[in-house]
């Protein structure tokens, strides 16, 4: 109709149509956090792994639970105590957080890498999300999967005879569980940026993640090791996460003789995660192996 102005025009107070002012090319329209986009990507990632929950949640929980069954049966259910509790109670917290960390790594490393291989990486890079928002959504989804696996493991292990999962320090359970999951999620995200095929990612899992998690005091206290191997264990971040998480349940740890040593470890793993997050952010922002 003649009395309708063009959609690209605006009316001044005097009723004179003026061209609509669009933002200058390259000038951001979203000046703060894009919460809608962040939530959308997070929900997309959660729904992705939840659609195959048998594979992503229950199967890892059962596989990790079998470690508890095999070791407790092999060593005998009674008579063997570590840190003042039976072996099953000692090893259960370490297995729970180990399962959480490994699945956080698996989730963060798969989605981004599959996008690179299938040519759909543009779906992650094109939306109006900053590098920090992209990283936050991916890490949050990986942590969500880790906590679901942890809950499934807790439920299974509470049914096993001799396991006592009474919590002595809730803050330690929450903090080390969260920090351990974030640590492996960031490593997984970094691995997916670096890897060019699934074999590369599997190599990191088999030759780095699995050995560091299994040889970090999950099944033993490091005081039983030779001094040289104790020193090696104490430079392994997995050791502090697993021992700190176990401290939350048992109230005891092989990190040090005092609770202050556990607190220092909690602060240390937080600093490590902050540094790692900054490195991943800078790599993501540089477009290395993503925008070539």
Image: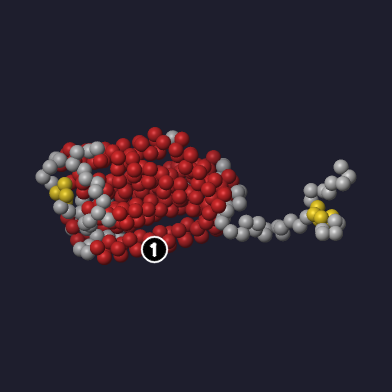
Residue 270 falls left or right of residue 281: left
Front one among 280 and 267: 267
Image coordinates for residue 172, horizontal then vertical, percent: 30, 56
What residue is shown at x 16% (from left), y 49% (from top)?
Answer: 85
Element at label 1: helix
- Residue 290 in view of the camera: no
Residue, far right: 2
Q: Quadrant of residue 118?
A: top right
Image coordinates for residue 25, horizontal then vertical, percent: 71, 57
- Residue 55 in view of the camera: yes
Residue 169 falls left or right of residue 17: left
Front one among 56 and 249: 249
What residue is shown at x 43% (from left), y 61% (from top)?
Answer: 274
What residue is shown at x 47% (from left), y 57% (from top)?
Answer: 280
Q: Which residue is mark 1?
A: 271
Front one among 261 and 190: 261
């Amino acid at each position: 109709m003649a009395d309708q102005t063009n959609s690209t025009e605006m009316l001044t107070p005097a009723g004179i149509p003026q061209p609509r002012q669009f933002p200058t090319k390259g000038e951001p329209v979203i000046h703060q956090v894009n919460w809608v986009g962040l939530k959308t990507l997070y929900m997309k990632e959660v729904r992705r792994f939840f659609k195959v929950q048998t594979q992503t949640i229950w199967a890892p929980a059962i596989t990790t639970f079998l470690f508890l069954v095999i070791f407790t049966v092999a060593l005998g259910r009674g008579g063997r105590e570590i840190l003042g509790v039976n072996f099953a109670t000692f090893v259960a917290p370490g297995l729970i957080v180990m399962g959480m960390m490994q699945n956080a790594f698996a989730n963060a490393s798969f989605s981004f890498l599959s996008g690179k291989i299938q040519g759909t990486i543009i779906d992650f890079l094109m939306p109006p999300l900053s590098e920090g928002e992209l990283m936050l959504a991916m890490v949050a989804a990986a942590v969500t999967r880790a906590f679901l696996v942890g809950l499934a493991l807790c439920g299974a292990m509470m049914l096993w005879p001799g396991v006592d999962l009474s919590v002595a320090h809730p803050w330690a359970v929450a903090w080390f569980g969260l920090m351990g999951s974030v640590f492996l999620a960031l490593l997984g995200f970094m691995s997916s940026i670096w890897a060019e095929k699934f074999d590369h990612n599997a190599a990191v899992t088999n030759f780095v993640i699995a050995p560091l998690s299994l040889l970090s005091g999950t099944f033993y206290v490091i005081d039983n090791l030779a001094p040289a191997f104790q020193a090696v264990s104490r430079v392994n971040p997995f050791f502090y996460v697993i021992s700190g998480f176990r401290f939350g349940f048992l109230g005891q740890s092989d990190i040090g003789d005092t609770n202050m040593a556990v607190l220092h470890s909690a602060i240390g793993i937080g600093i490590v995660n902050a540094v790692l997050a900054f490195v991943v952010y800078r790599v993501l922002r540089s477009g290395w192996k993503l925008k070539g």
